[in-house]
Image (cartoon, rainbow, N blue to C red):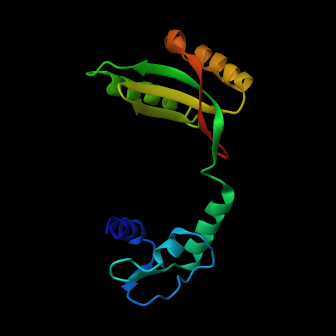
Amino acid sequence: MKKLIGVIALFCSVGLFAQTTDSAAVRTSAPETLFSTLAEPDSQTNAVINVYLKPIMQKAIEAQKGSGANETQRGFRVQLFSSNNAQRARGDAFNVEKTILDKMPNLPVYVTYTSPFWKVRVGNCTTHAEAQTLRQYLIENFPEFQTETYIVPDQIVLNQ
C-alpha cells in the first residue's frame, strides 16, 4: 500500500497512471526501472500498475539513469561544524550552511544528523590532496570556522 501511495504522489503531476488487474507490461522502453517493478503483479490482489509517461518525461528518466547522478564512492569532505548541544546544534548547523551558501552557492554543503551530533561537511573530494586544498580555501574565506575545520573520510557523490 505504501508503494502505491508513493507512486501516486510522485507521478500525479507527471502523467496519467491507472491501476488494473491484468498483467500488462509497463509501456516504457527502459528496462529495470521503478515502472517495471510496479508492473509485477501484487502478491495479494494480483493487481499491477501501468504508468503512462509523456515522451519528454521518458527521455528525462533515461537521461538521468545514464548520467550516473546517484553514484557514490569513498572520498573526503571538509567538516566545518559538529555539535551535540541538544538545544542549539540543529539551528547552528543550518546557520553554518546558510553562511557558506550565501558566499559560495555552488559549493556542495551537507548537513547531517548522526545521533547525537549535527555536522556540516563541504565538498566531494576524491583525494586527500584535493580535500586539503579545499580546506585551505575554506579557512581563508571563513576564518571563523578555522578551529573546527577537519578533513574527514566520507561517502561522496560523483558527477555533481
Residue at horizontal 42 percent and vertical 70 percent from the top: 11
Quadrant hosting residue 59: bottom right
Q: Quadrant of the N terminus?
A: bottom left
Residue 128 visible to the viewer: yes
Nearest to the observer: residue 142 or residue 72: 72
Q: Nearer the viewer, residue 146 or 22?
A: 22
145 left or right of 32 in image: left
Q: Residue 117 appears at what percent x and percent y?
A: 39, 24
Q: Image height check: is 132 above or below 90?
A: above
Instruction: State the image quarter where residue 130 is shown.
Output: top right
Q: Quadrant of the C terminus?
A: top right
Identity of the residue drawn at 40% across and 30% down:
114
Q: In the image, residue 12 lies at what x, y percent?
A: 38, 72
Towards the viewer: 45 or 131: 45
Image position, residue 110 (x, y; %): 50, 34
Direction front: furthest residue: 43
Residue 106 x, y percent position in the rendering: 59, 37
Q: Is residue 138 left or right of residue 88?
A: right
How many marks the image carries: the answer is: 0
Which residue is rendered at x = 34% and y = 22% of the image? 89
Residue in view at x 35 percent, y 25 percent:
116
Q: Is residue 103 visible?
A: no
Residue at the outermost left position: 87
